[in-house]
Amino acid sequence: MIKYWCIKDNIEAKESICNICGERTEVQSVIYWCDECNVPVYEDKCPICGSHLRRLTSDVRPVFPEERLLIEIALGKPFAYIKSSVWNGTGNNYYADGKRINVSVKKLMELDDNYVRNEYNRLSVDNTYEYFNKIIAKFIRANEDRYNYITKEAMSYIRDKAAGYDLNEMFVSFSGGKDSTVTSDLVMKALSTPRILHIFGDTTLEFPETMKYVEEFKKEHPKTPLISSRNKDKNFEELCKQIGPPSRVMRWCCTIFKTGAISRKIDMLFKNKKRILTFYGIRRSESASRSKYDRDSDSPKIAKQRTVSPIIDWFDFDVWLYMLTAKVNFNNAYRLGYARVGCWCCPNNSDWSGFLSKIHMPGQYFHFRDMLIEFARDIGKKDAEVYIDTGKWKARQGGNGIEYAKTSVVSFAPCALEENAFNYELQKNITEEFFELFKPFGELNYEMGNKRLGEVYVLDHNGNVLLRIQGRVGSNQLKVIIVNHRIAGSRNIKNAEEKIKCQITKYQMCMACLACEAVCRHDAIKISQDKDGRINYRIDDNRCKHCGECVGHFVGGCYMRKVLAIKR
């Protein structure tokens, strides 16, 4: 039973917006268990047998025979639950026939993975879907009303939001996970066409099963265009060695391998479109951060893009009810026991997910572990293996111990001879591209300045001087004179000087992560890296509106500055 709860007024509400205070409510649910039919039910009375049901948990997902067998092996009870109705509930709790199974993930991680893997491979030949299929058939029958309700509502919502849009003005954001799979199916059915574009964000860190599923999807939907976006210029392992592996608070991988690449693909595909409608599989129940998402909103990246999330209030229960009822093919990783299938080595993945990877993809798992241990030793961790195996690397913050982090430091001193002038000693010699970073402040003029000093003027739209920049190509000495502090919305000289340091930091640290490209709403910034590693950072004069968003969006001006902040 779905419930909305207003945190502010501490009362139950009827909708996602409280009719008393107008604040967004939190979505809650209750899943019941029918002891007679042996399945979870969304209502408190079983539609099949009429029994009044007992509360089980707030959300559940089915445990497929593959995952069930692995649990049984770990418990030392092969096939003990082969005939049982097995489900996984909130808090990663396992239930067999409505009763909780005592499964300790911590103890699972201590098991000999070779033994578990060999047993799994040996016993898999006798594993069967016979009993599972009968249970799922009853689950579908018991929750038919819930399926009809959520399906009808979502499809009506999709048709309403797509009204007035042409087919070539919309696309489905496709990850290969269960949520985007359901969203894709709903959109194609609601709009009565398979010809809607799908964009798959290939992070290069996908589960092997995800890549297989994407190929299956293409074969099953030959009329559905599916285009992949991928950052071909970057290598994950090389970046891990250069700036350290991503952590829960520094998931630089999302920016470099997902956000930037997808944004660039969208810009290319919809360059001449005045508006774009994007269907996302985001759900509020997935995390605390997503609980505050709107069902439809303007994209923070592209002004003409509208994003809608048809299943935002669905639970895992609903997603699986839909796929199993509609017989939608899905990523095989879920059968193995993965609850989510983003990047396989994500620091946000659970210990259970790590255990599954150790069993089902040991080559990749142990290669990544060795890489993490090497990194831990490089930054001075004496207990490197313990640091990695206990998951402490996932909470890492800052760039201490990392050589590349030193580029985040900007050394400067006020000029004693000239007012509002600052001298900088850069950690990287000045190139012609360096001055591109000052375009967000105004128009560059190379003729007015003293060429002997390598001086470039920055002018406002009326031709008034804002900045004088003195720096010869090939030198690391720079002088910036602030003539007018009103650059990129600066309130005073100090604020203007901070914005200038932002651009210098960006120049020193730039590694073509594409974050700047992604935040520019005017598609003015283009970043590339040649085969020799040289970064080319260009700002289109005709597109740049001097809004300053690329300057102040990230702390210190550069996304990598945030990732590699050094404790001083």
Image (tube, rainbow, N blue to C red):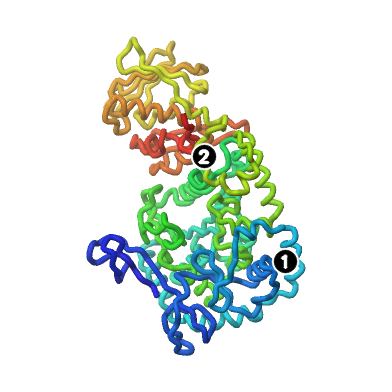
For residue 377, above or below residue 138? above
For residue 555, above or below residue 257? above
Q: Quadrant of residue 410?
A: top left
**Badge nearest the viewer, 2 or 1:** 1
**Crowd class of label 2 (few under 14; some 14 to 19; many from 20; radius 10 Å):** many
Return the x and y of residue 258 as percentages of the image width and height.
52, 49
User: 299 or 552: nearer the eye?
Assistant: 552
Residue at image mark 2: 513
For this orientation, the residue located farthest to the bottom is 49
User: 550 or 312: nearer the eye?
Assistant: 312
Return the x and y of residue 128 as percentages of the image width and height.
69, 77
Which residue appears at 35% of the width and 24% of the height?
458
Report the disc number at residue 120: 1
**Residue 452 in view:** yes
Which residue appears at 48% of the width and 27% of the height?
433
Return the x and y of residue 79 as percentages of the image width and height.
69, 75
Query: In the image, is 215 to the left or to the right of 269?
Result: right
Q: Secondary structure at mark 1?
A: helix
Question: Which quadrant would the N terminus be assigned to in this image?
Answer: bottom left
User: 306 or 76: nearer the eye?
Assistant: 76
Tell me the CA gap for discs 2 and 1: 41 Å
Which residue appears at 49% of the width and 48% of the height?
259
For residue 91, above or below residue 80? above
Which residue appears at 29% of the width and 31% of the height?
490
For residue 75, above or below residue 406? below
Q: Amino acid at mark 1?
A: Tyr
